Amino acid sequence: MNKLSYGLLSLLSTEPMTGYDLTTKINRFWRSTHSAIYPLLSELEEKELIALTLVNQNGKPDKKIYNLTTQGKSVLQDWFLSDTDEAVVRDEMTLKLYCIKCMDTDAGEKLLDELEIKYKKKIDHYKGSIEKLKLMSSDTLKNTSSSLFGGYILTQRALNDAILGLKWCHWVKKVYKLEDFSFLDEDFN
């Protein structure tokens, strides 16, 4: 099985979902499409790793809800225990920053301003998401078996990454604008 198959099984371990829901949620972790996911769902169903429930809808096609089977849970547990590959990263901003010496000052400053704005938006977004999760149920966030716990810890990680990224961005702007390299040996925090 490929990583996307395991990803779908892992998402279904949190709750039953439609193919649309699975596509939306998996895209939080890596990019995929309906055309890649739906054939895998059929394959996982054939292997009896997931089960399909049809929900009748008035005036619409039946809704397909996928559930993880006992066999699927077993396969998933084996995957959880297996070694995890390094993340695959494709980051246009980082590539541009790597080449900042080739830019004129205005272009370099524009790029850094763009990055700063992105980090600030992310910080606001993640803070809002954490507040919503706390409002939904602060007690279940303290329970590792809660369906919200995984989302909470990953949102907190994303917030911390954005805060650190913003601090780093400010440090780079200081070096870039002032061309003062005397503090390069210092921590950017």
Image: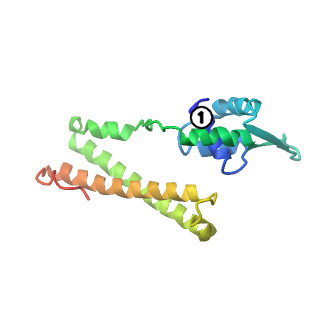
Q: Is residue 33 left or right of residue 183?
A: right
Relative to the observer, which residue lies in front, 77 or 13?
A: 77
Q: Residue at x 24, y 37 (%)?
A: 103
Q: Residue 104 appears at what percent x and percent y?
A: 22, 39
Q: Residue 75 appears at what percent x and percent y?
A: 65, 37
Residue located beneath label 1 in the image: 4
The answer to which image quadrant residue 70 occupies is top right
Q: Is residue 26 left or right of residue 109?
A: right
The answer to which image quadrant residue 148 occupies is bottom right
Query: Which element carries disc 1, helix, strand or loop?
Result: helix
Three-letter amino acid code of the residue under disc 1: Leu
Q: Is residue 160 left or right of residue 33?
A: left
Q: Residue at x 66, y 43 (%)?
A: 22
Q: Residue at x 45, y 54 (%)?
A: 158
Is residue 11 something that shows in the picture? yes
| Quadrant containing the N terminus in the rendered view | top right
Q: Residue 118 appears at what percent x and percent y?
A: 41, 52
